[in-house]
Amino acid sequence: MNNTPAFHSEINDLYVSNPYPSFGETVTVRLRVPRAGAPEGAAAPEGAAASRRVLLRRLENGTNVHMSMRFERSDTLFDWYACDLRINQKNVHWHFIIIQGTETFYYTRKSVTRYPPTEDHDFVLIADFENPDWVPRSVFYQIFVDRFRNGNPANDVENGSYVFDGHPTRKNEWGSVPPEYSEAHCLDFYGGDLEGVRDMIPWFKEIGVNALYLNPIFSARTNHKYDCIDYFSVDEAFGGGKALKDLTDALHEAGMRVLVDVSINHTGSDHPWYRTALENPSSSERSYYYFDDQGSAKKWRGVESLPQLNYGSQELRGLIFENNDSLVRKYISEYGIDGWRFDVAMDTGRNDRDQLGNDIFARVRSRTKELKKDCYLIGEHWKDNISYLLGDQLDGMMNYFASSRPLRTFAGETERYLVGDGIPLEPGTGITTGTDLAAQILQHYARLPNQIAFLQFNLIDSHDIHRLHNNQAVHNFGVYSGIVMFMYLLPGTPNVYYGDEIGLAGRVDTVEACRYPMEWDRSKHNTEFYNLYTKLSHLKQAEKALQCGSMRIVYADDDVCVLARWYDETAFVAILAKNAESKTLALPLSAIGAADGSRWTDALALNGGHFAGTVRNGFLDVTIGVRGSVLLRGTVLKG
């Protein structure tokens, strides 16, 4: 994950004999180095390589250790080195030192330097890591349940079914535009339910989806269900517990997985715990929340209907994650869900002196992995989230930080958090160049433990931000298609927000505007979007290069960024471009193992694409049209 020179290693089975070792195991670690004169098939390095020394530098029990790496073989482009590494610590991390003549290079996952680097970009192996190995092979599909499909009108919330916070419920006609919060107060319902989700398993298979992420399904007052009133029951408007069990059974029978969203940061203000806490200051439920001396409860970000939970309460911890019948265990053991997405994970357990978030998620991991070792645990976090991703807490985060946010600014939108400060969404302020995009991606991925990097939850859109394609001020399908390609190529799993695969309508002004009901009339589907997402989804499931392959950004300039993934002899190269004029790129594909003469073609053939080219002198020349994003496929030397 670094720029030139083209030293390379990775944590997959081509570079580490066992990428998921047990404590006490010895593994073989490999590094490839650009050839220094050895002829193809030579038994030992010749020429300049004979004077080369290659070291693996690790920290062992606090002591700096240099391990000599032995020469293994050469191919057309690279010399290969290896050494045996004992996994005698929970976390083993290292980087490489290459000494050739009078030059010394230090190679980490981020860069190559001529000086000793810090350790935060080292290669990392975590012993006994509880790996949800199905995740890198998955394409997730996010469903805001009320807006997806009505499978059982008998359980619909009707006009005036109940009143919450002074406002009555209302039923919307499917296909109508969602009313704003000021009009409906999140009490407007379309009737989508879990039976409707189950009905569409054939659709998921058609578009290449094999995992679902469901927004909250627990009993609540609003349509979004983040204001939970009972963690231990599924909302009857969604079909109740039976509908969830029927869905998980059907998904598993179809070879699919399901992730459920929950907020353990706050309940709804109508939750019996909170009502008891208000009515009886001596109750144990009072300790579940933060109350000040005036008897006022702390609310999540000041939202009156969302009182924040206080994990100083051991009783609350028991209910949410410690007890055998706790929330996080119940839905795994009784309903068979395959993991959790934790809403506002970055805020959970945090209130001035109380900074309990990392401890909470360490315990959540322990208690859930005891039941299902390969359950997938992710959280919501929009910013730098490294403290949660060290192997002892969450498996991944919603990767706004290194996918959605920088990809959107590359497209021309103002950075998300500047918009929050009142700066207009567009024309964009602080537009990201291709070089900036490369740096933002690498600064995140190069810090993550390698095993965690393959579990990132990559996305463009979600229920919390407008759909990028609905921003007509910046939308261009050429640029957009390249952004989607990046989402699929970044290590981890892509998340398709329901309707993105058909170009679902919406606006950009509020979150209600990104929660339109799904369109099921195929004549109204955008075929460009459908073809883009469907082809990429099926590729992701089929190609190891897009699952556990190496990653490298091979080129970047002001308006282009080029990302490569490869495994064994197969490689994919995504060119994300917003160029205003045609241009020719000279891509240094020898860095990823493309030998002279290797053939490259358009992997998707969108919009009549027909590129075919050959690597010469280590470079592939690609001429792209205006905003001519393209995904290329070619062959590389094994590795």
Image (cartoon, rainbow, N blue to C red):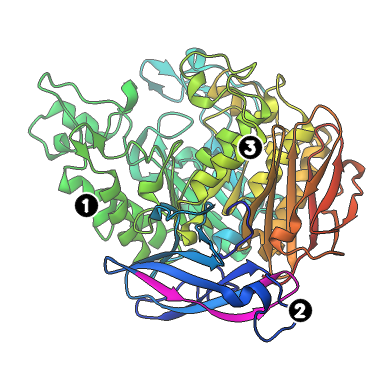
Secondary structure of the residue carrying tag 1 is helix
Front label number (3 vs 1): 3
Q: Disc 3 or 1, which lies upstream in sequence?
A: 1
Q: Position of residue 229 (x, y in %)?
A: 33, 36
Q: Is residue 630 toward the left or the right of residue 353 in the image?
A: right
Q: Residues within 10 Å of mark 2 (few under 14, many from 20)?
A: some
Going by the numbered disc 3, the residue's amino acid type is Thr
Which residue in the structure is indicated by mark 1? 318
Going by the numbered disc 1, the residue's amino acid type is Gly
Identify the image quadrant of residue 380.
Answer: top left
Q: Is residue 88 toward the left or the right of residue 134 in the image?
A: left
Q: Position of residue 2 (x, y in %)?
A: 58, 53
Give the residue drawn at x 73%, y 48%. Answer: 574
Instruction: Decide: is 336 above or below 155.
Output: below
Which residue in the structure is indicated by mark 3? 435
Which label sits on residue 332? none
Q: Quadrant of the C terminus?
A: bottom right
Q: Residue furthest bottom?
A: 43
Q: Disc 2 or 1, which lies upstream in sequence?
A: 2
Q: Position of residue 613 (x, y in %)?
A: 89, 54
